[in-house]
Image (cartoon, rainbow, N blue to C red):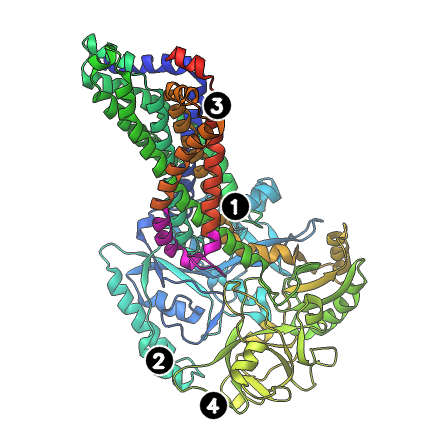
Amino acid sequence: MDAFWQDLQLAARSYRQQPGFTAVAVLILALGIGANTAIYSLVDAVALRPLPVAHTSDLYRLGDNLNCCVNTGLQGDFSLFSYPLYQRLRDHIPELSPLAAFQVRPLPFSVRRAGTAAAARPMIGEFVSGNYFDTFGVPMAAGRGLADSDDAPGAAPVAVLSYRAWRDHHAKDPSVVGAAFTVNATPVTVVGVTAPEFFGETLRPDPPDLWVALGAEPTIRGASSLIARPGQHWLYAIGRLTPGASPAVVEQKASALLREFLATVPDLSPANIADLPKQRIVVAEAGTGVSALRSRYAEPLRVLAIVSALVLFIACANLAHLLLARAQPFPFAMRAALGASRGRLIQQMMAGGLLLAVAGGTAGVLVAYACTRTILATVFRGADVVPIDVTPSTAGLMFAAAVSLVTGVIFTALPAWIMSKTNPMDILRGSGRSTADRAALPRQGLVVLQVAVSLVLLVGAGLLTESLRRLERQDFGFQIDGRYVVKIDPSLAGYSPERLGELYDKLHTALPQVPGVVSASMSQYSPMEGLNWSGPISAEGRTPPADRTESASFVRIGPKYFETIGTRLVRGRTIDERDRPGTTLVAVINQTLARQFFPNVDPIGRHLGRGDASRAMDLEIVGVVEDAKYTRADQPAWPTFFIPLLQFVPAGDVSTQMRSMFVRAIELHVAGSPASLDADVRRAIARVDPNLTVTAILSMEEQVGRNFNQQRLVARLTALYGQLALLLAAIGLYGITAHHVSRRIGEIGVRMALGADRGRVLRMVLRSALVQCGAGVAIGLPIALFASRGLATQLYGVTPRDPVVIGAAVAVLLVATIVAALIPARRAAAVDPIRALRAE
């Protein structure tokens, strides 16, 4: 141990004497280790870290897929449940007890503390069962959690506040517990505050600010209530597996109960009845909660983990090359001649490498911290609250330490092995050239590998960047420039369906008067918002296929909707002021629906309906608009029809009809960029009704951009890591070329003395660098072509073997090689042959 300590001190003195080399080496390591630690920290936070609750290994979920937000009909593998179905499962599966239910998608609530002058503020709320907090074992910072009795019919509405909302909005006022609040015009009592670390059962942007007992759902949502609807599935369920119970047994019981329940649901179609035996419930581990964000980023994180590992490899190869170039054979030979064993000499080099690795790892943690903040800003773009702590976790620090130690071994192993093979007597006799030549081939090999790996990363980065560019710049079927979306919800202000007509008329009158607003309209949901309402439809004169149910998306819209968002009318007319309750039921369809349901005929004047063939004559088609994307930017537009805001369509569930009439978005077409648009719009809406809360105002560009957080994260980080790899490869090329020139000064002097001009010397040095680059490209190109196939699912509008992207990557590498080799090449061309020969 004393010997190793002495070796560390010797290495430290050596590095202090060469501050430039030390700084470059630490910087290279910091970038390589920091990049890997940042990705690991993100993987740990998003995919591995369990919920901050007790005994997460006991948590199991009924269902293993992701759905949103209210589902009618059959699902195959059920993950969403109606409240009556949840009750059946809760009461008849003792092996999974307690079993909690919670809303799939939290809602914006209007919340105000009763008896105060404070204005109502929008807060994110989630309906949960009374046993929710007991099931998860969530500790309370104040008060109590919800109880089973809070779900009982007629129970007083109660809620639990998040610690963040308690701290930020109420300054941790203890009187909040037990205080009355108005939630969507309904009196609700806050009975507790959660522990600071609890963000809910799902890792998501803007987690809930309060959890409301399911017993209060009918009172708060009124006509939009779902709790009594057996065919409306809108709840997830997680429970605790009792000791000795088997998930397989629970799965069998739950699937049998599901099929029994579905058989009692009214209005099932013959096709649905035939499919009942295929319905089942999968039981899945839920220690990490519902993995919406986790599932979405699983594939991108795997790609980034591979990319960061390749960058670390290049960093190690670069440092190994630098150490080889730095290694001085004479001191090594002198120590060996004085009696030092090969093992001790190798230990000295390894000690120096580990010292560099520790310094690089320490700096890498700081790099990782900064990178993680940037990564999270991309993942949670548009979120006011990010439920992930960016402080390096214990697991992240241990990962950084492990990577640092392994890295230290990797980048010192090759130099130590080469030096150990050196004959010290040859060096002491002055035969140093042979030693230098022995190390030249490994150094060149390392540079070739760096070039090959850099090409792989550059091709991947180019493909992902081009895919993102095409995603963002595609024709969405609506205009982005000058368009804004205002998020509202009349149900938050206590509106009933009967009062909506008057409200919408006032908004249609007030909003176009806002300075800068060219036109305004409203809709059930807006393009690329992340929502989709759909259901089975039938069309006049069309025989539906026997083996499947045809469906389409639908959107309720107001007058001037298409003109406002910039979707082009193809034929017929749009929905306007004449389409009100009591008039002919009409619909406008998109081109995809027209092609699918009305091939080879003009759809204007024909009919369609929601439901089976008996409803095919309900809606008269009055117009066709161009296709526009509303949910998936990487897929073609879905068949969609548009209906007036308040026309009641006599089909389907009445509750669904009522809920669809509440607009969630106001669309604005604005001229220029009015500085006071946000304030002016809020004032205009407040004049219509001061209780109508605006939950958000954002540009259509921002709304569309939030859909590409995943692609943007992968493309930008891969591009960043590709640039880092290119920089490291260029450093390696520069280093090997400069070292090569310094070792050939005498030879160059002889060549120039015999008549070689400067241009020839310059070309000779550049040719050597380009040969190494060419060898790297020859190795890396097949690997890049093979590896790019793994990115196929991440690409849009570009093939994995796009020749332009691959050609650009090769061109960038060639330019970087020329730039890196040009400085030592110019130095070689400027050699004075007389001085070089004298020195030789």
Q: Nearer the viewer, mark 4 or mark 2?
A: 4
Q: Choose the circle earlier in sequence order: 1 or 3.
A: 1
Q: Main secondary structure of the magenta part?
A: helix
Q: Give the alpha-carbon distance from disc 4 to disc 2, as whole Å.
A: 21 Å
Q: Quadrant of residue 271?
A: bottom left
The amino acid sitting under disc 1 is Val
Mark 2 and mark 3 residues within 8 Å of each other at the beta carbon: no
Mark 3 lies on residue: 827
Disc 1 residue crowd, few under 14, some 14–19, many 20+, Cα 10 Å: some
**Considering depth in this image, is 444 or 603 the residue closer to the camera?**
444
Q: Give the alpha-carbon distance from disc 2 to disc 1, as whole Å.
A: 42 Å
Q: Is residue 267 left or right of residue 281?
A: right
The amino acid sitting under disc 3 is Arg
Q: Nearer the viewer, mark 4 or mark 3?
A: 3
The amino acid sitting under disc 2 is Asp
Q: Give the alpha-carbon distance from disc 4 to disc 1, as whole Å.
A: 50 Å
